[in-house]
Image: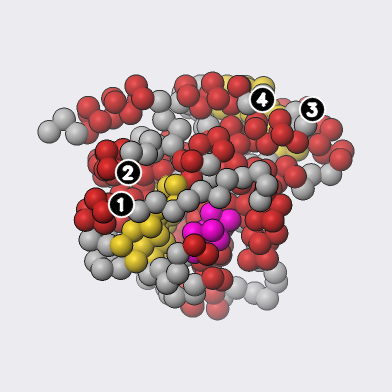
């Protein structure tokens, strides 16, 4: 049975949550002079395609091409002197990897990234260019968290995971903080969901600024662990989800993000890969923005009709735009041939 947000919140104890709105405000102040405040984008074509009044928060224009820079810079900035000297390690398919690499370079911290050997080439090249050491692995035979833990222990490095970290979540929450500060009286905010760092942080900010605004998480149908977790109230997993949304191939929500999603998010929906590419096509052609599959999931969620947004005022967070043109062309040819 699907419980309401109020019912889920009533089950929480009185202990301080791992991330609260004040943490997001603190992150916003810390990253202010380093992260870009991405401007709201509107499009008549997008409004017509969704039957809604849509306000796009384009984090594809963020440093490193994705929202991840916010959380990474916030987390690395709060390390102790000893931790900075020892260096930072993370595991990521690409966007968090680039964010950690650039943040490390800006702060003078050595970074090592564990990436799958099939990570998008554009993300692999960028991560190296931003100054990180990259170690690749076979995702079908190696558990990335175990490999990262082994390397970090050997080198004495601090692990900053892609989403399940309070400073990362707080940094990601600044996306919605800016969106809802710039656009009043939103009825909905649609947010892409992988490990739910962006979703949980955005939901905390949204409920603090505009409590009546409904927060909708969107994930690929082939990787629906968050939706099943949300519906059941228990953590669900999915192994190596086969989806074009590489940033949402996470196997499960985190120990931090799962309870935050349950406490602050209003609903979860899924979109098929076909719908994701159709949303990419709309955004590329009508807004002239390069948006990667994961970044287009929120737009696909608005277009899909699972949530009645007709006549509503809707915020849409585009999480990133790191896709190479050859890969995008292949997707367009495969899914839009007819």
Disc 3: CA contacts within 10 A as few (<14), some (14-19) or many (>=20): few
Which tag, 4 or 1, sits closer to the chain's start?
1
- Quadrant location of the N terminus in the rendered image: bottom left
Q: Which residue is mark 4?
A: 132
Q: Which residue is mark 2?
A: 287
Cα distance, mark 4 to mark 1? 37 Å
Residue 72 painted magenta: no
Q: Is residue 68 left or right of residue 322?
A: right
Residue 155, label in figure: 3
Disc 4 on helix, strand or loop? loop
- The answer to the question of whether label 4 and label 1 lie on touching residues, with beta carbons closer than 8 A, is no
- Quadrant location of the C terminus in the rendered image: top left
> Eyeballing the image, is 98 above or below 203?
above
Cα distance, mark 3 to mark 2? 45 Å
**Mark 4, mark 1: which one is toward the viewer?**
1
Which tag, 3 or 1, sits closer to the chain's start?
1
- The answer to the question of whether label 1 and label 2 lie on touching residues, with beta carbons closer than 8 A, is yes
Give the percent coordinates (x, y) of residue 175: 53, 54
């Amino acid at each position: 049975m699907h419980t309401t947000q109020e019912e889920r919140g009533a089950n929480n104890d009185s202990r301080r949550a791992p991330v609260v709105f004040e943490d997001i405000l603190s992150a916003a102040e810390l990253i202010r002079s380093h992260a870009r405040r991405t401007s709201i984008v509107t499009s008549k074509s997008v409004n017509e395609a969704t039957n809604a009044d849509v306000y796009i928060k384009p984090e594809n224009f963020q440093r490193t091409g994705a929202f991840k820079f916010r959380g990474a810079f916030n987390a690395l900035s709060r390390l102790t002197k000893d931790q900075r000297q020892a260096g930072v390690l993370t595991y990521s398919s690409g966007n968090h990897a680039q964010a950690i690499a650039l943040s490390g370079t800006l702060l003078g911290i050595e970074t090592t990234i564990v990436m799958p050997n099939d990570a998008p080439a554009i993300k692999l090249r960028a991560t190296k260019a931003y100054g990180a050491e990259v170690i690749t692995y076979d995702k079908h035979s190696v558990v990335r968290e175990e490999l990262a833990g082994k390397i970090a222990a050997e080198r004495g490095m601090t692990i900053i995971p892609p989403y399940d970290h309070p400073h990362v979540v707080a940094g990601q929450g600044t996306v919605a903080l800016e969106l809802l500060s710039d656009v009043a009286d939103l009825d909905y905010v649609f947010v892409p969901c992988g490990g739910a760092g962006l979703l949980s942080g955005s939901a905390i900010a949204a409920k603090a600024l505009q409590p009546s605004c409904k927060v909708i998480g969107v994930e690929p149908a082939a990787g629906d662990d968050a939706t099943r977790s949300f519906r059941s109230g228990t953590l669900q997993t999915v192994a190596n989800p086969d989806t074009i949304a590489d940033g949402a191939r996470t196997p499960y929500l985190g120990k931090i993000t799962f309870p935050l999603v349950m406490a602050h998010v209003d609903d979860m929906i899924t979109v098929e890969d076909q719908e994701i590419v159709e949303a990419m096509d709309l955004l590329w052609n009508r807004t002239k923005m390069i948006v990667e599959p994961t970044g287009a999931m929120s737009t696909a969620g608005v277009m899909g009709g699972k949530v009645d947004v007709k006549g509503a005022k809707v915020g849409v967070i585009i999480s990133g735009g790191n896709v190479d043109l050859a890969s995008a062309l292949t997707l367009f040819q495969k899914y839009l041939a007819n």
